[in-house]
Image (cartoon, helix red, strand yellow):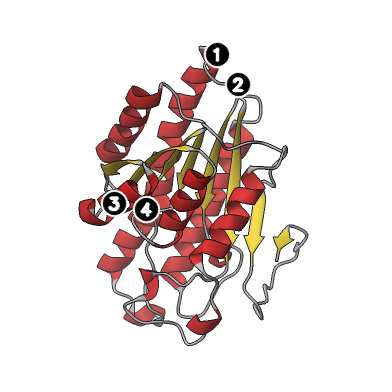
Amino acid sequence: MNSIKNKVVVITGASRGLGKALTVILAARGAKLVISGRSAKDLEEVAKETNAIPVTVDVTKEGDVANLAKVAISKFGHINIWINNAGLWLPKAPVESLNIKRAHELIEVNLFGTMYGSREAIICMKESISAKKIKKGMIVNIVSTSALQGRAGQSAYAASKHAAKGFTDSIREELLASGISVVGVYPGGIKTSLFDEKKPEDFKDFMTPESVAEKIVQNLEKDQPDIEQVLIRPGQTLNIANKANKTK
């Protein structure tokens, strides 16, 4: 079992939902946490509850993400785990009615936010491994089952998540000999404020943030964590060829 205690963990999108749930669970496991989000007020509340270090960050701004890494390093000297959790969603709409401006923003957060975070994590972790401050590092990208199949009315969201999966798979290959592992997490619907604008019809069947966070942390505690963790909700089906990595 890989203990989380005293591991330095950075989490984006930690002010609510899954990010907050991950923060609470990791804090209970004894992790040292640096958390980020857009809302300073919400972030401060989570930080007080978990003794985490809050950093206000817009993940679409490269400088903000670089500063997040700088704060973590200045406080703890290294980063063991970086979790890219920040994300946006758009209510279902046919592509001809798609709000392109909002689609751009969604892709900036879901794809480029993940790219910026991963890049900063890689830079920091490689330096720490080279300096023998840590033996290994881990990047965890929270993606979605929408990255595994297309969905009618969800073209922009699915596109952003397919791209995030492609990025995640690619950096995993790049980092094979580096000591840095990359985990892709693919949840299938979580009851969070992400859906406040217009809840999906089956929202009541979605998973709780706490249950999903617990499964993610349990995977991270394995000696060899699964590099792909697919978390489907009850009654959900995926039309994908390889379902071997599905976790119920």
Q: Which mark is residue 135?
A: 2
Q: Which mark is residue 132?
A: 1
Residue pictured at 45% horizontal, 83% vertical: 200
Q: Residue 125: image x %, image y %?
A: 49, 26
Q: CA distance from mark 3 to mark 1?
A: 32 Å
For label 3, the residue is 43
Q: Pointers 2 and 1 in contact (CB under 8 A)? A: yes
Regarding residue 169, the answer to whether it shows in the image is no
Q: Please, is residue 152 above or below residue 176 in the view? A: below
Of 60 and 79, which appears nearest the observer?
79
For the C terminus, the quadrant is: bottom right
Q: CA distance from mark 3 to mark 4?
A: 9 Å
Q: Report which quarter residue 234 is drawn in.
A: bottom right
How many C-alpha atoms fall within 10 Å of the one at disc 4: few (<14), some, or many (≥20)? many
Q: CA distance from mark 2 to mark 3?
A: 30 Å
Q: Residue 61: image x %, image y %?
A: 26, 44
For label 4, the residue is 13
Of 174 and 79, which appears nearest the observer?
79
For the N terminus, the quadrant is: top right
Marked residue nearer the N-terminal end (3 or 4): 4
Secondary structure of the residue carrying tag 3 is: helix
Q: Amino acid at mark 1?
A: Lys
Q: Amino acid at mark 3?
A: Leu
